[in-house]
Image (spheres, grey):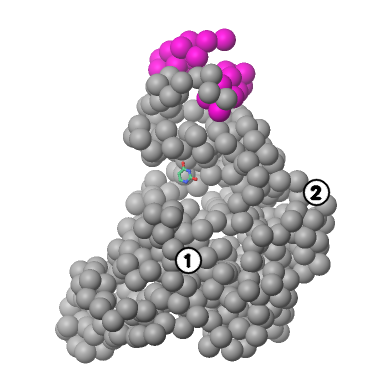
Amino acid sequence: MRIVDIIEKKRDGGELTTEEIRFFVEGYTNGSIPDYQASSLLMAIYFKDMNDRERADLTMAMVESGDQIDLSKIEGIKVDKHSTGGVGDTTTLVLGPLVAAVGVPVAKMSGRGLGHTGGTIDKLEAIEGFHVELTTEQFIEQVNDIKLAVIGQTGNLTPADKKLYALRDVTATVSSIPLIASSIMSKKIAAGADAIVLDVKTGEGAFMKTVEDAKNLAHAMVQIGNNVGRNTMAIISDMSQPLGFAIGNALEVKEAIDTLRGEGPEDLTELCLTLGSQMVVLGGHAKTIEEAREQLLEVIKNGSALEIFKQFIEGQGGNPAVVDDTSLLPQAQYTFEVPAKEDGFVSFIEADEVGTAAMLLGAGRATKESTIDLAVGLMLRKKVGDKVTKGESLVTIYANQEDVSSVIDKIYSHIKIANEAPQAPKLIEAIITE
Ligand code: URA
Ligand code: CA
């Protein structure tokens, strides 16, 4: 087999065989296929696309390029959730305990934040003592015990994807549906998921700016999942404004605790109930979405979701007392209000820019090497559609620095006030099951 023939075939719109796709992925991972030929094939895929079978084959070839986490010693169907990345997205912290309380095992591998989006591990580390370095045995034991554990990235998972993603980044081939879908799905499958729930974000703060693109990506991923034997569902959710009120690590932990108590922001709560219901159905603990939702509401009401969160914190070395006393979380030294300059209605809160404002305070990383400040961040006091009067606070800044003028400037440039009430963005744009 020669890679040049495979490139030519795809260039002319042909369908690649399973063997050809394997040959490419293996050859690129082990270095026998050089960057220039891989880039050429990626560009051909970008223009000529791949059919469902090719996409499934590409995904599995990337899964098989490295280690796979074996979760077979965990009882039950392991359902993983993936979000395509948002600002102030605290869902994993809420969903884990929530669905675990219903009996769905959550064995989650999470990452750290980069740029304007946060990471679950950073948020959890805002809890004193909490650590994600568990051995595989400890990880599995904790999931069997309390149904929930979170670890950091371990093992050599999907090396093909790492290498290809880096190459795509510099060859203008990132925004290709078959390439994105196989990249995301390969990582979930290698991490041991039996079933997958996807939260595809759309809007200003998201990777997919339009609902149309988000739907196409969601369909592609659901197809791949179902074609490779992993039950998969997706929702399309709004990321034109940040989710909930809190943006910043300790602030989001507090927001997650509030939500598990049934006192969280409306949008975050609704998103968690929607995604959670799908996880419960895929996990085999309910027949219908409605039945699953009832179960989730019940574990919020009777306190068992919050109880699991405590056990989870304790199991991973953290101080569970934070759940009842959130003043034990890291606290910022200073707070500043950002008052509205006029009367009206909030018409726009640009999620990615507000995320960047939080990053400037130290809540996020500008580069992989940056250190972050777990205490700092932003609390939105208004969301899109809310009425506001001049002088009322739009945002509270939590900072460990006295000069926050650049952050305030950024907030003013990216939160818009209009005379008329705007149409509030729809939180859940679509639910995709096939
Ligand atoms: N996220 C991924 O993991 N892969 C892509 O290709 C794009 C976004
Ligand atoms: Ca939030």
Q: Is 146 left, or right, of 66 in this rendering?
A: right
Q: Is mark 2 within 8 Å of ligand 1?
A: no
Residue 414 position, x and y percent, is: 24, 68
Residue 400 position, x and y percent, is: 37, 79
Magenta stretch bounds = 1-29
Q: Quadrant of the N terminus?
A: top right
Residue 410 position, x and y percent, is: 24, 69
Can residue 427 be seen at all in this image of the molecule? no
Q: Nearer the viewer, residue 197 or 106?
A: 106
What residue lies at 43% left-to-right and 13% top-to-bottom? Answer: 8
Q: Is mark 1 within 8 Å of ligand 2?
A: yes
| In magenta stretch: residue 14 | yes
As helix, strand or loop, the secondary structure at mark 2 comes to loop
Query: Mark 1 to mark 2: distance in Å?
Result: 30 Å
What residue lies at 45% left-to-right and 77% top-to-bottom? Answer: 375
| In magenta stretch: residue 412 | no
Q: Is residue 138 above or below residue 331?
A: above
Q: Main secondary structure of the magenta part?
A: helix
Amino acid at dot 2:
Ser
What residue lies at 57% left-to-right and 36% top-to-bottom? Answer: 159
Q: Quadrant of the C terminus?
A: top right
Q: Nearer the viewer, residue 257 or 239?
A: 257
Mark 1, residue position:
89
Mark 2, residue position:
72
The circle drawn on residue 247 is none
Number of residues whose C-alpha sits closer than 10 Å to that of mark 2, classed few (under 14), some (14–19) or many (20 or more): few
Q: Is 197 left, or right, of 365 in this rendering?
A: right
Q: Nearer the viewer, residue 144 or 132?
A: 132
